[in-house]
Image (spheres, grey):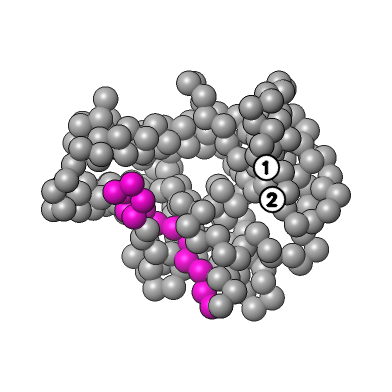
Amino acid sequence: MKTYTSLESISDGKIYDINDLVNVDTENCNRCSACCHNIGEMVELTPFDIHEMVKSLNTNFDQLFDDKIELVTNNKLALPYLKMHGTSEKCSFLNHNNRCIIHSARPNICRLFPLGRLYEDDGFRYVLIVDACFKEDLKPITVKEWINIDNYSENKIFIFEWYKLLKALTFRLKFVYDEKELQAINEYLINTFYRMPLKKDQDFYTAFKERLPEAKNRLNIL
């Protein structure tokens, strides 16, 4: 674990690896749901997030648009985000007791909070965003225990590949001005990865790896 003074404005100035201890354990939050309100345009959903939601709720991607997610366009990319409800801008996955109904399948960004990712040339590590959580006296826990996700290594590879794909595509879209072309690119991205069907006995990560090379070619991304 290293300390970088350049991160001090938003973090505690440290970079954490997966087995490092970090003060983020809320001890079940004590029924606080402050971080689940007014966060709509902060929680961009990955194809893996959608895969987990669909499996948990026994639904499909398109049905989530009824009241759970919405498309948000940012830098010409139209991607699904969590949908907020009511005057309190409450996450669509909170029940009447303000408890998450998909907690075991919650999005990666929700798993991280109040951690953030610091992307590097060959992957990413983690930073602690200061004053992000309203709960006082957070307890130490390892990053891995806090994220608590199955197949962490495969998940990390996916997240980094998805990050690189979107970064390259965002750069390419700077030079696309035709609205029909932009729409076609966004529809292709959604259809290829968010509506991605799995073959029998195939897991998400294998399906993603199979589709990624063709998608890069179709999207003119190196």
Residue 187's x, y, as percent? 23, 53
**Mark drawn on residue 43:** none
In this picture, residue 62 sits left or right of residue 108: left
Query: Splitting the image into 4 quarters, where does residue 217 fall?
Result: top left
State which region is magenta: 73-86
Q: Position of residue 78 (x, y in %)?
A: 32, 53
Amino acid type, callout 2: Ala
Q: Nearer the viewer, residue 210 or 65?
A: 65
Q: Quadrant of residue 212?
A: top left
Give the quarter of the image for residue 176. Answer: top left
Mark 2–mark 1 CB contact (< 8 Å):
yes
User: Where is mark 1, residue-wise?
Assistant: 129
- Residue, disc 2: 132
How far across and how far down the image is residue 116, in percent? Answer: 61, 40
Q: Nearer the viewer, residue 196 or 173?
A: 173
Q: Is residue 143 left or right of residue 157?
A: right
Q: Residue at x 16, y 53 (%)?
A: 179
Q: Residue drawn 65% across and 31% down? A: 7
Q: Which residue does the image show at 67% across and 68% down from the upper left?
A: 99
Left or right side of 164 for 179: left
- Distance between mark 2 and mark 1 Cα atoms: 6 Å
Horizontal arrangement in the rendering, residue 160 relative to residue 209 (left or right): right
Q: Is residue 83 above or below residue 2?
A: below
Please, is residue 22 above or below residue 89 in the view? above
Crowding near pointer 2: few (<14 within 10 Å), some, many (20+)? few
Disc 1, SS: loop
- Local SS, label 2: loop
